[in-house]
Amino acid sequence: MPKITYIEPNGNESVVDVPEGWTLMQGATSNGIDGIEAECGGSCSCATCHCYVETHADKLAAASETEEAMLTNVAAERRPNSRLSCQIKAIAELDGMVVRLPAAQS
Amino acid sequence: MAIVIIGAGQAGLQVAEALRSDGYDGAITMIGDEPRPPYQRPPLSKAYLLGEFTEAQLTLRAPEVLARKNITLLSGVSVTAVDRAAKQVRLSDGRAIDYAGLCLATGSRPRPLPVPGADLANVLPLRTLADTRAIAAILPKTERVLVIGGGFIGLEFAAVARKLGKEVVVLEGAERLMPRAVTPMMSEFFRKLHVDHGVAVELNAAVSRLTGAEGKVAAVCTADGREFPADLVLVGIGILPNVELAQATGLECERGIVVDACSRTADAAIVAAGDCTARRLPDGSLLRLESVQNAIEQGKSAAAALLGKERPFVASPWFWSDQYDVKLQMVGLANGHDRTVMRGAPASHKFSAFHYRGDVLLAVDSVNRPEDHMPARKLLDQGLSPSFAQVADLGIPLIAR
Ligand SMILES: Cc1cc2nc3c(=O)[nH]c(=O)nc-3n(C[C@H](O)[C@H](O)[C@H](O)COP(=O)(O)OP(=O)(O)OC[C@H]3O[C@@H](n4cnc5c(N)ncnc54)[C@H](O)[C@@H]3O)c2cc1C
Ligand code: FES
């Protein structure tokens, strides 16, 4: 299982084994990591699962048109490494990836 | 002071977690009659039946997380009575638990189909994981799916069944689809969408009875004498809020447990959140919402209220639905609108309908236009109304940057 490090807004770091096929959002919410709200449960409809991708960006598929559109209106600052964590599926190549969570999701 | 939460769904979980993040460190007991920890319902009628999700992925929090937050979850047990005088709830297993603060988060249940034959095998609702498992078990042996009720759940399921290659008929009693939730223009858009995907959509279809063979459903009959053969019948004709506990203990219930904007009931020790409630608006009317956002927002308000704080639910209501490759996102309440301004053309499958009363924006329905939905939420939350010309011109952003 790829290990993903989530850095919460307060600086807390959690390393989570996210099963392959799960999204980074599911890995975070099921483990009770604060800083991801995920109101729509991964339907790419709420933009409350925003994260900043700190590593492994080259291993990710590009954001879909819908994700791009949702990202234009995230609550926190949008940066070049902004993604919606519900649109990133854990795969072996992402082992060791680090994502940072923004201070606000809504 | 001990807090008891009845119902372990989206709202119940939100209340428990919000109590902790608001700094409450006393006892929290959440009691749910389903035999599993809180999970998400929206995927049940969407990706889940396509095999895109596992059960574990539906679970909102792993049980260890609840334990870590010191939230006691009693699963597979129901609350049978609330004794407000003794400040105690009684459980189906004979136990009684005292409370200082109580939250009713009992959700809702599918409205039963009131016609003969509704109890035949393979006539199923879609509310719980157990319902979905029952559907998944018979789908492989099913060729003809009949959906009673052209609301969100019925239509989402129809889309899934088409993707799985089933023959699908949708019977809707009203003259248009999703009549309570969307405007006639949107009803027509979705009717056409489903027809284009090979669904037979029958409007004004009053189901009069279901007939069966060997205990299993075989056909659905309508009042005008038509008969639709079916191997599986999905009943999606709305929900009934679970108000019985509240009613029995004398709390005001009208289309739901009546709460104020802060999720409070008339009993200072009792709050309520989610599908089971009806919220009293400033003008005195009652608003019933059946959505994740409502469960979350009311859950946060309810937790605050239990701790003596006011956190009113003021955000504009929003909702989404996924059908085929169409994402519908709605925000606001269109009731009473007298003008609709289009942004984009329906034929393009990428458009938004902006509903106004006078020049005040009331609601925005977006089809595959998340770039409109998100700013629309901001505009409505801030009480701002873009001009008609601005909305109608795709080249002008909704919010100036
Ligand atoms: C198939 C489906 C698709 C949906 N899609 C969407 C969508 O796309 N977008 C959206 O916003 N919303 C959607 N919804 C609605 C959304 O899921 C609900 O509004 C939300 O789950 C409400 O949460 P709740 O906690 O109030 O109720 P529930 O999630 O129903 O939780 C209440 C729980 O309390 C339990 N309970 C009831 N009485 C008792 C008792 N006496 N003792 C113990 N436990 C009890 C119930 O069994 C249940 O487990 C969908 C719903 C369904 C069924
Ligand atoms: S969870 Fe809603 S957009 Fe990711």
Image: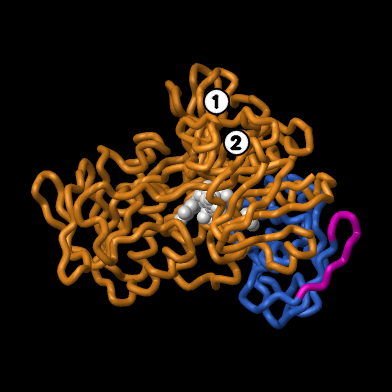
Q: Which of the two residues, A80 or B79, is positioned nearer the viewer here? A: B79
The structure residue drawn at horizontal position 29% and vertical position 66%, both measured from the top left corner, is: B122
Please identify the quadrant where the N terminus of chain B is shown.
top right
The structure residue drawn at horizontal position 23% and vertical position 68%, both measured from the top left corner, is: B231
In the image: residue B75, left or right of residue B212: right
Subunit that carries the residue with mark 1: B
Quarter holding ligand 2: bottom right
Q: Which residue is mark 1?
A: B361
Q: Colour of chain B?
A: orange
Q: Tell me the magenta residue range.
A: A8-16
User: Which residue occupies the extreme right position in the image?
Assistant: A11
Amino acid at the residue labelled 2: Ala
Q: Position of residue B234 (x, y in %)?
A: 32, 58
Disc 1, disc 2: CB below 8 Å? yes
Q: Is residue B182 above or below residue A57?
A: above
Are the residues flagged by discs 1 and 2 from a single subunit? yes
Mark 1 or mark 2: which comes first in sequence?
Answer: 1
Q: CA distance from mark 1 to mark 2?
A: 9 Å
Q: Colour of chain A?
A: blue
Q: Secondary structure at mark 1?
A: strand
In the image: residue B29, left or right of residue B323: right
Q: Which of the two residues, B191 or B75, is positioned nearer the viewer here? A: B75
Residue B33 seen in this snapshot = yes
Q: Position of residue B194 (x, y in %)?
A: 32, 54
Q: Is residue B238 above or below residue B34?
A: above
Q: Position of residue B401 (x, y in %)?
A: 72, 36
The structure residue drawn at horizontal position 71% and vertical position 59%, both measured from the top left corner, is: B72
Residue B369 seen in this snapshot = no
Subunit that carries the residue with mark 2: B
Q: Position of residue B299 (x, y in %)?
A: 66, 43
Q: Residues within 10 Å of mark 2 (few under 14, many from 20)?
A: many
Q: Which residue is mark 2?
A: B376
